[in-house]
Image (tube, helix red, strand yellow):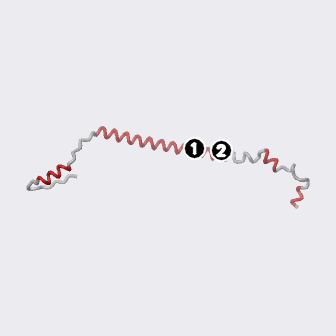
Amino acid sequence: MVRKVYVRQRENAIVNRLNKTREEKFPDLRAEKEEFLKKTAKEERRARDEQRAREKQEKREREQLKWQKEHAYDDLFSEENMQASSNLDRDTDFLDDFM
């Protein structure tokens, strides 16, 4: 912001202090634009990579849940469980327990 004030008489002390704090910039706009574009491209690439990683993790979790649902009862009818619940190893009058 530039503020202009009309002064009748010039005061060198004030002018000298102002000149000490003056900053003149001659920016290289092309270099700044290229740097900005590189920075934004890098951020977009990082965001894409994070999104891909999240999607990959979610897919892996869905596949694991699907596999668990499909194989939840695989060991239910195993040979060991079938023999443990068979009636062959029980007493001959095992039905009397129900009466």
**Residue 13 falls in which quadrant of the image?**
bottom left
The picture places residue 26, in percent across and down from the top left corner, at 23, 41
**47 sits left or right of 70 in the view:** left
| Spatial CA span between label 1 and label 2 | 12 Å
The picture places residue 95, in percent across and down from the top left corner, at 88, 56
The picture places residue 86, in percent across and down from the top left corner, at 84, 49
Q: Relative to 73, does residue 7 appear above or below in the rendering?
A: below
Q: Relative to 5, does residue 70 appear above or below in the rendering?
A: above
Q: Residue at x 53, y 44 (%)?
A: 55
- Residue 67: numbered disc: 2
Which residue is label 1 attached to?
A: 59
- Residue 92: numbered disc: none
Q: Amino acid at mark 1?
A: Lys
**Residue 25 falls in which quadrant of the image?**
top left
**85 sits left or right of 12 in the view:** right
Identify the mark nearer the N-term, 1 or 2: 1
Q: Residue at x 9, y 53 (%)?
A: 10
